[in-house]
Image (cartoon, rainbow, N blue to C red):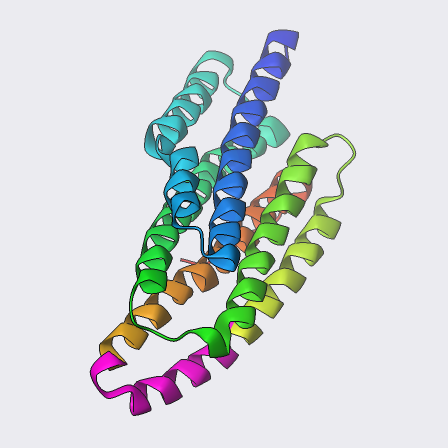
Amino acid sequence: MLPRYENKLIEIRGMISVLLSQIILSSEETLTAFEHNKHDLFENSRTYVKNLQSDTNKIDNEIIKTFALFGPEADELRLLVAYLKMTNEIERIGDGIKKYSRRLQEHCMGGCDMSIITQAIIQLHKTTINALQYILECLNNIETCDADDTYRKVMVEESKNDDLFSIMEKELLNLIIDANELAVEYVKVLGTLRKLERIGDRTVNIASLMLYAQKGGELNLHS
């Protein structure tokens, strides 16, 4: 392929990297807000992803234009397909973080006592941040990154995520049974935490796409 095509790939990868970095910043600030009960940080955390849809649309448009201009084949085509699918997963992760931040803020300001699961929530949140950071590191070092190794690391975090969510689900179900008038609020907390569980699944999807781009094979993504 022409050097111009290689430059276009670098540009697209850079755009994806910036978007992913913004989502990680949003997630980290949301976690800090929860840990230190700082409601202003909840608000600020969502500013990092306020243009999420327009940013992903710009990346998708660049990918489509690259398809049209260069007609890539084989490995190059597989890479662009992976990037196109990746932006969809990243957008859904960013949207999930934004909704999680808003709902968690509401829970913290409400009447629910979440002290029994506070540390588990923090650990659950950290699994998603760790997984996203592994992906970003691989993306920023694409020439030397081993996609197999990144996939394994992300899978470890997703496994922790599943285990932590299962523990909290049991704790919350017990709270729901005993909470009486606050039962509905604890149901909402469970729904909020499920967003982190789904984000864990989506990080695996992105790691799978990176593996597909590097090694080929078949894609099996979570819906």
Outermost residue, left direction? 181
Image position of 154 (left or right of 80): right
Residue 136 position, x and y percent, is: 63, 39
Image position of 55 (left or right of 36): left
Q: Is residue 205 above or below residue 184?
A: above
Residue 161 position, x and y percent, is: 56, 67
User: Is residue 162 in sight in this rendering?
Assistant: no
- Report the predominant secondary structure element of the magenta stretch: helix
Task: Point out the stretch of residues depicted in magenta.
Answer: 165-182
User: Is residue 148 in sight in this rendering?
Assistant: yes
Magenta stretch containing residue 125, yes or no?
no
Nearest the viewer among 45 and 149 is 45
Q: Is residue 131 above or below residue 45?
A: below
Residue 216 position, x and y percent, is: 63, 43
Outermost residue, right direction? 144
Residue in the image at 35% along x and 34% along y:
50
Residue in the image at 55% along x and 63% along y:
122
